[in-house]
């Protein structure tokens, strides 16, 4: 997130997307952001859902310069974990919400779990997260994926029940 610039917001035929092609992890010791490649060393597009994030990014594209950080500090600087925690009051806000002891990376897991619970395809979630394989995604989120066969069978049963109600077999006809 920290490494995204305004130029990384791309229009696509289906709406806006973020091009993730670099990362800015924090250097141990100095705390400075270090620009580099992603862990997978591959670029990916993440579709922006409708709502506040989409509107924010569209506004930044309309009003910012391509090289500006997409999510910058009030002084236009890059966010690091340290300055984000300090300036956003992240620790106190999560404590007030009753979800203390959660780090920023936990939000990634929450998003992936939410996508899978909502019925997103495993390959789609793999692409959004930038995992090397769907197997990696399935291994990490097995607690969600393991429920999918049961839900699929329930949906199949519902389909069969609807089909039987609409198309009775000849053996089901009277006389």
Image (cartoon, grey):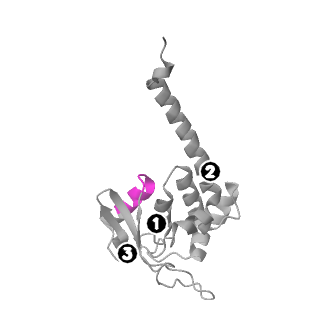
Q: Distance between the residues labelled 2 and 1?
A: 21 Å
> Gap between marks 2 and 3, in whole Å?
43 Å
Q: Where is residue 46 in the image (x, y as percent from the top left)?
A: 42, 64
Mark 3 vs 1, N-terminal side: 3
From this view, report whether residue 24 is shown above or below residue 157: below
Q: Which of 139 and 18 is in front in this view?
A: 139
* 160 vs 75: above or below: above
39 or 98: nearer the viewer: 39
Q: Nearer the viewer, residue 18 or 142?
A: 142
Q: Give the residues in magenta.
A: 49-59
Q: Is mark 1 on a helix, strand or loop?
A: helix
Whether pointer 2 and pointer 1 mark residues with C-beta atoms closer than 8 Å, the reply is: no
Image mark for residue 147: 2
Q: Which of marks 2 and 1 is in front?
A: 2
User: Which labelled disc corresponds to residue 68?
Assistant: 3
Mark 2 or 1, nearer chain start: 1
Helix, strand or loop at mark 2: loop
Residue 14 x, y percent position in the rendering? 32, 56
**Left or right placement of residue 125 versus residue 62 in this view:** right
Residue under the image location 39 percent in, 62 percent down:
57
Give the residue drawn at x 53%, y 49%.
Answer: 118
Q: x and y percent of residue 41 in the render?
A: 46, 80
Q: Main secondary structure of the magenta part?
A: helix
**Direction left: furthest residue:** 13
Residue 123 location, x and y as percent?
A: 47, 62
Q: Which mark is residue 127?
A: 1
Mark 3, Cα crowd under 10 Å, few <14 / some 14-19 / many 20+, is some
Q: Is residue 89 visible?
A: no
Between marks 3 and 1, how big is the CA–CA gap? Answer: 26 Å
The quarter holding residue 56 reads: bottom left
């Amino acid at each position: 997130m920290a490494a995204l610039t305004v130029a990384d917001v791309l229009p696509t035929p289906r709406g806006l997307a973020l091009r993730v092609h670099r990362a800015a992890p924090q250097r141990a010791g100095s705390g400075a952001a270090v620009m580099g490649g992603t862990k997978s060393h591959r670029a990916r597009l993440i579709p922006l859902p409708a709502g506040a994030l989409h509107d924010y990014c569209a506004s930044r594209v309309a009003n910012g310069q391509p090289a500006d950080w997409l999510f910058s500090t009030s002084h236009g600087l890059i966010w690091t974990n340290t300055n984000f925690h300090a300036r956003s009051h992240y620790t106190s806000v999560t404590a007030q919400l009753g979800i203390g002891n959660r780090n920023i990376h936990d939000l990634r897991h929450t998003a992936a779990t939410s996508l899978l619970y909502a019925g997103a395809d495993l390959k789609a979630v793999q692409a959004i997260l930038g995992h090397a394989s769907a197997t990696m995604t399935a291994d990490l989120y097995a607690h969600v994926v393991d429920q999918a066969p049961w839900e699929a069978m329930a949906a199949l049963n519902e389909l069969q029940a609807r089909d039987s109600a609409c198309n009775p077999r000849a053996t089901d006809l009277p006389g």
